[in-house]
Image (cartoon, rainbow, N blue to C red):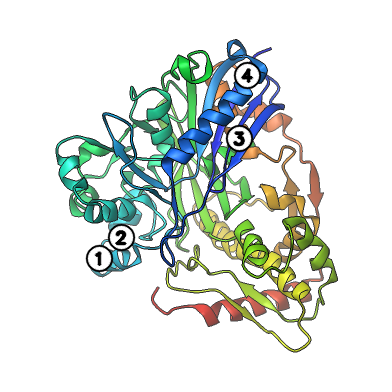
Amino acid sequence: MGFVLAIDQGTTSTRAIVFDEAGRPGASAAIPLTQIFPAPGWVEHDPEEIWNAVREVCSAVVREVGAANIAAVGITNQRETTVVWDRATGTPLHNAIVWQDRRTAPLCEELKREGWGTHVTDVTGLLIDPYFSATKLAWLLGNVPGLAERCARGEVCFGTIDSFLLFKLTGGALHATDATNAARTMLFDIGKGVWDPELLEHLQIPTGILPEVRDTRGDFGMTQAEAFGAALPIRGVAGDQQAAAKGQACVRPSMIKATYGTGCFVVANTGDSPAQSANRMLTTVLSQEEGVRTFALEGAIFMAGATIQWLRDNLGLIADAAESETLAKQANPESGVYLVPAFQGLGAPVWDAEARGAIVGLSRASTKADVVAAGLESMAFQTRDLLGAMREDMAGAGIGENDILRVDGGMTANGWAMQRLADILGECVEVAPIPETTSLGAAYFAGQAAGFYGDDAELARTWKPARRYEPQMAPSEREARYAGWLEAIARVRSGKT
């Protein structure tokens, strides 16, 4: 039996998992990733640490199953995170600027004042925000001494994490990305499938530093033999949220998934035409196969699991993530406490980079259990914000209704949080059968290119949820709680959107 090796390079860890021909996970290895915070609102990663971790976890897994049994390699990655490196040596020229980083908020405001908002949305499907790669790259070009001059001499490569890993894995033979990652840079024309010359010119980004854009599944070269004991074919690359949608078998228009990891990302399949949002959702590429793009609507919550980390690491209210469920069950359901986790601003549908977090509704009777429950509940409220806007956009585009949300990610292990999600949404929540759904999606893309797993219709037929949560909360309570959330959001808005 052959295996597909999935490399999942995420925001907080680097993981490798092999999946067999039935999509069952086997050997795996993971290493946590150091978070670097040089200044308030700034977040960086060390690209060399990422590369070393990829080599270590992949080597461990390949040793266990044997390199000769690996039919294909798939890569999935944290998106938008921006890296520049030396074309000759592969050496990073600065720490990677992470998707959560907000340092380019002033540049984004300048672009908005200059009237670039409509062009960005029409061409890239995105909104002007520090979240995306374009202004991160512009910041690097303007602030790393000598970088712009080296770019002009053709000595520099830019890429998202997938591009950097492809370059390193192939020994510098390939400087490429796939369409799902290109679509997250705020530089890519998702309709034409090319880099946008107007944005590149305005931001003074040289075309020569950009990667070639390829299909999501296909030929991405071979790993160097010395890396894992054999040259392995790389046959799929996808951004983490697109990979998770694949792993959830959201292969038909109207199907929606949410991944609860560091952040939460809700993705809705909209088929072969990009759906324009009237509600500040993002239009993005779900996949590209044989040059044909499938599109999606997406909304991002910047803080999901990261909120629980904050409650643990910064406030010391819990010892570990599992304790959050225990405490939430002890909370007073009438406490009136809301936690708005706008520590890195607010994402969709608000898009307020200057908003900041707050805990509101505290009284002398409030307990740490109330605060922890509010942190978990904030995930449900933010998901409702996204789904309401997204479904309105989908209805406007003539895409059918779907009242089931498929979920994956680490937070789905918290039964209280998942039940509260179903309650606040007022709809069914289905939990993925395999927790590492992002890795599974990467394996599906690469495996299908290698003749595994059948077509997308087969993936849809075989998908079954591990657990199913139905709403139990009375509609009156649901709406009262949501109204309180909207009031809390209004308190933290900066007024600059």
Q: Nearer the viewer, mark 4 or mark 1?
A: 4
Q: Secondary structure at mark 3?
A: helix
How far is disc 1 from disc 2 in space, using C-alphas? 7 Å
Residue under pointer 2: 118
Q: Residues within 10 Å of mark 1 (few under 14, many from 20)?
A: few
Based on the displayed image, in which of its 4 quarters is residue 352 positioned?
Answer: bottom left
Q: Compare marks 4 and 1 and give the one earlier in the sequence.
A: 4
Can the viewer see residue 249? Answer: no
**Any part of residue 414 in sight:** yes
Please state which of residues 222 and 429 is positioned toward the viewer in this rendering: 222
Mark in the foreground, 2 or 4: 4
Asked if the residue at tag 2 contacts the one at tag 1, i.e. Cβ–Cβ closer than 8 Å, the answer is yes
| Residues at marks 4 and 1, CA–CA distance in whole angstroms | 54 Å
Tag 2: amino acid: Thr
Hey, what amino acid is under mark 1?
A: Gly
Find residue 263 and report its horizontal and vertical position in percent.
Answer: 57, 55
Query: From mark 1 to mark 3, how far is it between C-alphas?
Result: 39 Å
Q: CA distance from mark 2 to mark 4?
A: 51 Å
- Which residue is label 4 attached to? 63
**Residue 274 coordinates in the image, percent (x, y):** 43, 46
Rounded to the nearest angstrom, the CA distance separating label 4 from label 3 is: 19 Å
- Mark 3, residue position: 439
Residue 425, position in %: x, y?
A: 70, 62
| Mark number, residue 115 | 1
Amino acid marked by disc 3 = Ser
Q: Residue at x 75, y 75 (%)?
A: 368
CB within 8 Å, label 2 to label 3: no
The three-letter amino acid code for the residue at tag 4 is Arg
